[in-house]
Image (spheres, helix red, strand yellow):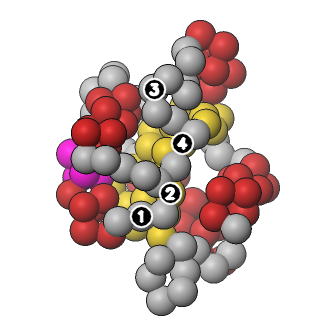
Amino acid sequence: MLDGRHVILYIDDERDFRDAVRVILEAHGYHMVEAPTAEEGLRVYREAQPDLVIVDLMMEEVDSGTTFVKELQALGNRAPIYMLSSIGDRFIQNVDYASMGLAGVFQKPLDPQTLLGVLRMQLG
């Protein structure tokens, strides 16, 4: 938490998506930190110690999102991690996301009500 607000780390190489999510989160009392790459996301994660993480599946490299999740696990992460995917339903059907250390998968583009509902459920 930062100043009484939950901190959400959002990692996505698409600036427009990061800007849109920031508007949603900040309008509802969350503090968002962001990164455009998985590598930068690790640095921000260490600094911000977020309460919840959202990471795009495919960024600078095809598997950068899953590699990022493995890195967080190695660091002993306890924050819920959500993968964001433009192939959402197919990803969920073909991959056991819980075994990957994920709390869930969001479909891209992100539905604001779905996002806010998950945040309320996970963070109170």
Which is nearer the N-term, disc 4 or disc 2?
2
Q: Residue 42, relative to residue 9: is it above or below?
A: above
Q: Which mark, by number, is residue 80?
A: none
Mark 3 vs mark 4: in front: 3
* Amino acid found under the numbered disc labelled 4: Tyr
Look at the numbered discs 2 and 1 and tell me whether their residues touch, using CB distance below 8 Å.
Answer: yes
Which is nearer the N-term, disc 4 or disc 1?
1
Q: To which residue does mark 3 refer?
A: 100
Which is nearer the N-term, disc 3 or disc 1?
1
Spatial CA span between label 2 and label 3: 16 Å
* Residue 68, picture quadrant: top left
* Amino acid found under the numbered disc labelled 3: Met
Spatial CA span between label 3 and label 1: 19 Å
Q: In the image shown, does 54 or 121 lie closer to the viewer?
A: 121
* Residues rendered magenta in the picture: 38-42
Q: To which residue does mark 4 refer?
A: 82
Look at the numbered discs 4 and 2 and tell me whether their residues touch, using CB distance below 8 Å.
Answer: yes
Q: Residues within 10 Å of mark 3 (few under 14, many from 20)?
A: some
Main secondary structure of the magenta stretch = helix
Q: To which residue does mark 2 refer?
A: 52
- Residue in the image at 68% along x and 21% along y: 89
* Amino acid found under the numbered disc labelled 1: Pro
Spatial CA span between label 2 and label 1: 5 Å
Q: Is residue 100 magenta?
A: no
Q: Residues within 10 Å of mark 4 (few under 14, many from 20)?
A: many
Spatial CA span between label 3 and label 4: 11 Å
